[in-house]
Image (cartoon, grey):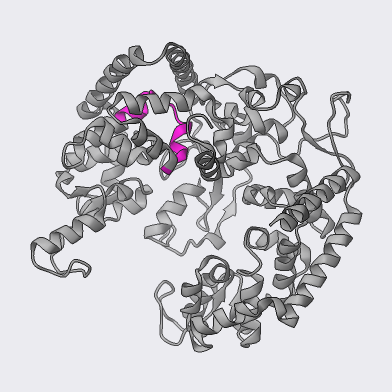
Amino acid sequence: MQEFGQNKVQTMVGKAPILFAVDISVWQTALTVMALCGLTRQAVLKAAHSNANVLRFNWLAAERLVNRLALQRCLPGGLSAGQVYERHAGYLAGTSAEKLAGRLLFLQHHGLLHLLVEKKGPARRQWRRQRGLPANRRAPGEPPLISLHDVSRPDARFASLPVVDEAGGLPALRAFQRGLKSSSAWLELQAAAEAEQVRLLPLLPEHLRQAALGGMAVAVEQEEEEEEAFEDIPEEYEDPLLGGVMRDPVRLPSGNVVERSSIAQQLLTDPRDPYTASGARRTTWCRCRSSRPGLRRGWRSSAASACRAEAGGCAMLLQPCDGLHRTCRACARPAALFARSRPPAARSAPPQALRRTSGARWRRRSSTSSGSSARDEQVFGRDRTLEMVDRAPILLVVGSSVWQTALAVMQLCGLTWDDVLKVARLNPSVLCCDWLEADRLVNRLALQRCLPGGLSAGQVYKEHAGYSVMYGTKRLAGRLLFLQHHGLLHLLVPEKEGLLEDWRQQRGLPANRRSPGEPPLISLRDVCVLTDGQFASLPAVAAAGGLPALQAFMAGLKVNPAWQQLQAAAEAEVARLLALLPQDVRQAAEKRQQVAEEGEEEE
């Protein structure tokens, strides 16, 4: 609050909830380094406010200094260190050195740096103006520019850029990456980064310097441990496409086992199995269960990831373990630091972990419980918790009663415990929502009534939990009622790409190209994600009156009988579910409802 002011702090935490769990010395070091590199205090605060995520990184790490030096040397105009931090702090802090600096060196190696620009749009408009052409229209002969956004894309997308493809494409990029750390340009950047570390450290305040030195020592020890752990990767656990340990192996139709993220990158440019050239859509993969036990035993995740899961708010999802009080190597700070952000009275209390006993009953482990009950089980497990917190950092600060309620509601609606955990793992952000709010139940009931096949409540949560709990009722339920009102529900499908591909294949057409006569299907993604203008521009909606018709329908939505019927059914469903919840979860839910009602009255 003292550094940024209340309003800016609220905005920053909304953008980057993980700041709750970041040690003060980490973001103070980030601000100090920017100031030491020439930025004014106002510019420093502006950079931090516009991209709050950059404050969670250690800006004195050699990797980030390598990125900064590479940007200074490769971007046109010869930017100073302060200008790089002011304009490109997000790329500098959030992208690995192998990706950002490595690709810049790849462009330099192939003589393509003259095409590198900070942003394509302004550079193209300037090129057109210099030739007397309309600034906002594409013109023949435009140079194939490469922006920093392009450089930070996945390997396959970066390699598909025209100039990179001409330089050898993905094979050339991977070959360069394999020899990157032995190249003279990379070694020169590393030496310059170490010299910059030595220059900046004495300029830091004493407490930040000590914290930075401790973090560096931990990072060196971590690297040594990781090198020792991964120097002999078993062949069956190594990704054949991009190398490295497979963390989520999938089996392709050809029978080959690859890392999920690797084949996903491959399919961005070529929708075929890389081994047989046959189709390899996501729906044709299957999880490779035979490799997963071994991955869990020794190759599932690195030491850094393990420490992240043990830190702070993750203790709410995990049983307390001995490693909770060790030093966290991932961020060079005590792993239990999250306790320091709680009130003093809460610091002495042991972490509370959600436990599941027989049936659908939950209890919270109290300080008086023995902790040795044979029936107690961890909810998600260590590895799954790692993945969930990486995808949804806000879980670190969400009250346990909120996600307990989500798990309980799914079970009460007919999902098995395995299905409940699967939903939570695939989209952990849904655990941050209050599933007993009437709005979310309105969405669920609308999906049950409007989707083809007459889905049950459990099926909606199992297949479409993200849509049902994370979007507003006017956006989801309101648009579904609009489609119903105009007789367009027969065009509504959960996912349209697969259906359109099947439609084309049945008619002997290329599966990945649009064809005339295709049905104007509307997917759930169209309903939830598109803006009003984009949704109204869909062919079927445009034929029903487009944006004016949509706006007129939404203006009268709350007096619509169908809407009022959904609201009444949702309130009845809230009452039904509340009566079935465990007592502690029900009391927490009722308290949240009371607070919400008081807030509405005040507004």
Q: Main secondary structure of the magenta part?
A: helix
Q: Nearer the viewer, residue 442 or 301?
A: 442
Q: Is residue 470 above or below residue 304?
A: below
The part of the image, by quadrant, that contains residue 386 is: top right
Please check the rendered image and state whether residue 54 is part of the magenta-colored stretch, yes or no. Answer: yes
Pick the quarter of the image with the C terminus: bottom right
Location of the N terminus by quadrant is top right
Indicate the position of residue 146 as horizontal and vertical percent values: 24, 51
Quadrant position of residue 96? top left
Q: Please give left or right for residue 576 compared with residue 560 in the image.
A: right
Q: Is residue 525 above or below residue 244?
A: below
Visible residue check, residue 152? yes
Residue 177 visible from this viewpoint: no
Is 71 on the left-hand or right-hand side of 52? left
User: Which residue shows up at 90% across the image and 42% down it?
Assistant: 358
Tell me: 181 left or right of 589: left
Q: Position of residue 447 (x, y in %)?
A: 70, 71
Up/down of 174 relative to 488, above or below = above
Instruction: Residue lying at the far left in this picture: please name it.
Output: 131
Residue 436 placed where, x, y %? Answer: 78, 56
Q: Nearer the viewer, residue 19 or 149?
A: 19
Q: Is residue 189 magenta?
A: no
Please name the residue shown 25% across and 47% down the image.
118
Q: Which residues are magenta?
A: 50-66
x, y (%) of residue 413? 82, 60
**Rendered residue at 87%/46% (across/down):** 587
Placement of 125 over or under 380, stated as above or below: below
The one nearer the camera, 432 or 361, is 432
Q: Residue furthest front?
A: 602
Query: In the figure, is residue 150 to the left or right of 589?
Result: left
